[in-house]
Amino acid sequence: MNIRRRPPNPSIKVANLEYAIPHVDEEPNNILEKIIWQKDKEIEVSRQKVPLDKLKSKILDLPRPRSFIKSLRNSSNHPALIAEIKKASPSKGVIREDFNPVEIAKAYSEGGATCLSVLTEKNFFLGGFDILTSVRKAVDIPLLCKDFVISPYQIYQARAAGADAVLLIAAILSDQDLAYLQKIAFKLELSVLVEVHNASELKRVFEIGSFSLVGINNRDLKTFHTDLATTENLAKEFAKDFSENEIILVSESGLFTRSDLNRVKAVGARAVLVGESLMKQGDIRKGISQLLKE
């Protein structure tokens, strides 16, 4: 793990004066670190508004989650499509001005998407758990809660909002955290998509074991540059590991055309996660049709 998770020491008041213990590096080093620092604060606010016990009580009456992994394995599309609902991103700003998540979800589902990914990060991607809840009511296919998960509390939030799967990002989590958060997700019967960006992260994931769904993100989360060669190189280097452990490989980011899908399919990608290119389509159903057409 090479992303610092903790922000500088907070200020404290002593005799009506405010002090902060000096910190050698008070500014985040990159956009990912900035997001994580903000996420710490966001979780604390959410805990104050909705305690964990209240979230747990909400979950008790919910139906069992849909099988995200089974849906990908049984998809008639090759590779299966995880279509993403995303209003904005730090690198692109607002992607879709006429953002109606319910209508977008319906278009994705009717257009042939196997599963959906819903951004719930609100400060940098303008998402939210309210969006996930509204999408859950609108469609019946499996939903991935896509966020920067660093606490078990967020997994309970995802389950309470109707998610069937959660994202864990290896770059921001230690091995111990990955294993523990996976355990919490499995306890709630949620699938886990663990995301990697390089060989060292992928090696860590394989060593931890028990992950059935691994996403290779073609976007460098520090620079936000995308390159499909990331999937190609890692899929080839770890082909034996994916095959022997029957792990579903998902290629994420930088996928815009059918030729892009064919490129990652050729190295073993069983599914793709596509957001920006579809979100920019005037006719989303037509956009999916063109993307999936072989």
Image (spheres, rainbow, N blue to C red):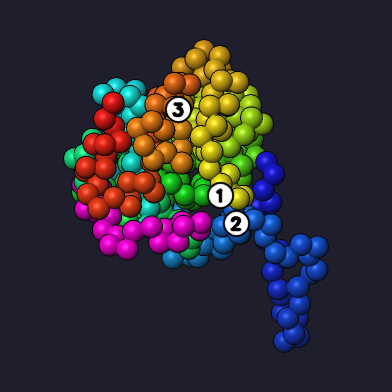
Which residue is found at the position 63% from the left and 26% from the top? 203
Question: Residue 82: where, in percent of width, then height?
Answer: 35, 37
Judging depth in this view, the residue of 26 and 277 nearest the camera is 277
Q: Which residue is mark 1?
A: 224
Q: Which residue is mark 2?
A: 31
Question: Residue 138: where, in percent of width, then height?
Answer: 21, 49
**Which amino acid lies under the numbered mark 3 shown in the image of this protein?**
Val
Q: Disc 1 to disc 3, how far (Cα)?
A: 19 Å
Residue 48 sits inside the magenta stretch: no
Question: Residue 283: where, in percent of width, then height?
Answer: 22, 49
Specify the quadrant of the image occupied by residue 257: top left
Going from N to C along the chain, the mark reached first, 2 or 1, is: 2
Q: Quadrant location of the C terminus?
A: top left
Q: Residues within 10 Å of mark 3 (few under 14, many from 20)?
A: many
Going from N to C along the chain, the mark reached first, 3 or 2, is: 2
**Which amino acid lies under the numbered mark 2 shown in the image of this protein?**
Ile
Which residue is found at the position 36% from the left and 46% from the top? 277
Which residue is found at the position 24% from the left and 47% from the top? 284
Asked if residue 51 is positioned above or below residue 226 in the image, the reply reads below
